[in-house]
Image (spheres, helix red, strand yellow):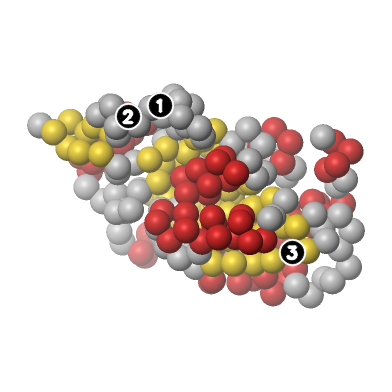
Amino acid sequence: MKIWVTAATAFEIQIAKETLQKNKHHKNITALHFATTGVGMLLSAVQLTKLVLTEHPDCIIQAGIAGTFHQHLKPASVVAVKKEMLGDTGVMEQQNWKDIFDLGLQSKNTKPFENGSITNHYLEQWNITALPEVSGISVNEISTNPQRIVQLNSKYAPDIETMEGVALHFVAGIFNIPYIQVRAISNVVGERDKQKWAMEKALQALNKAIIQYVEIFNEINFESKN
């Protein structure tokens, strides 16, 4: 099986890349590649589409850090995203946020959307390390305004915020490619004091999780599970 590990930036997966590329003795993984897509939904969507069309991966792993909306998700905890939503595609009218579904510009159930979100139905089979599953929201502008954070929480009830997650869910959903989005919590959404972040611990936990995932993946015969 051909596996691609992707991230917005190279430093997010550097440790996993260096560690896993030392092991050339693959069993079920016939090819393991790493790629950076760039930050944000636009760059990620383009690069992931190119990857799918030219490399024909059997599975895409998207790794990265994330902010959390909830205190129960502790710094450096690692999660898998079950459901993704668009967080800032729409308009603010009279202090009310209306997304493209509210505006009637997009059907809530046009593939790969289901009731306005994109659910990863591959997780039941592919979450092989039993990571806690959460819902995510993707934004082009990191949320810092307290009122905006309350609006997002109230409307979408997300667990985490990223800048690329929905791009993976959309592209993989359109092309029917198995995928998993793995995120490590680095901060609380809205907190801009980097001294209060857990960036280093989050990166260590993220890369440890990716290494473990790939190593276990290499031992599993997925064809026999289908």
Label located before the other in sequence (3 or 1): 3
The percent position of residue 4, horizontal first and vertical second, equals 67, 59
Instruction: Name the residue rendered at 42%, 37% in the picture.
Output: 85
Residue farthest to the front, as pictured: 53
- C-alpha separation, residue under disc 1 versus residue under disc 2: 6 Å
Dot 1 amino acid type = Lys
Instruction: Name the residue rendered at 54%, 57% in the picture.
Output: 48
> Is residue 175 positioned above or below 163 on the image?
above
The answer to whether 61 appears left or right of 187 in the picture is: right
The percent position of residue 221, horizontal first and vertical second, equals 87, 45
The residue tagged with tag 3: helix, strand or loop? strand
> Is residue 9 positioned above or below 78 on the image?
below
Residue 80 in sight here:
no
Disc 3: CA contacts within 10 A as few (<14), some (14-19) or many (>=20): some
Q: Which mark is residue 101?
A: 2
The residue tagged with tag 2: helix, strand or loop? loop
Q: Which mark is residue 45?
A: none
The percent position of residue 98, horizontal first and vertical second, equals 24, 32
Q: Which residue is mark 3?
A: 32
Quadrant where the C terminus sits is: top right
Residue nearer the viewer, 177 or 14 = 177
Dot 3 amino acid type = Leu
Disc 3 vs disc 1: which is toward the camera? 1
> Is residue 16 positioned above or below 44 on the image?
below
Dot 2 amino acid type = Phe
Q: Which residue is mark 1?
A: 108
Cβ–Cβ below 8 Å for labels 1 and 2? Answer: yes
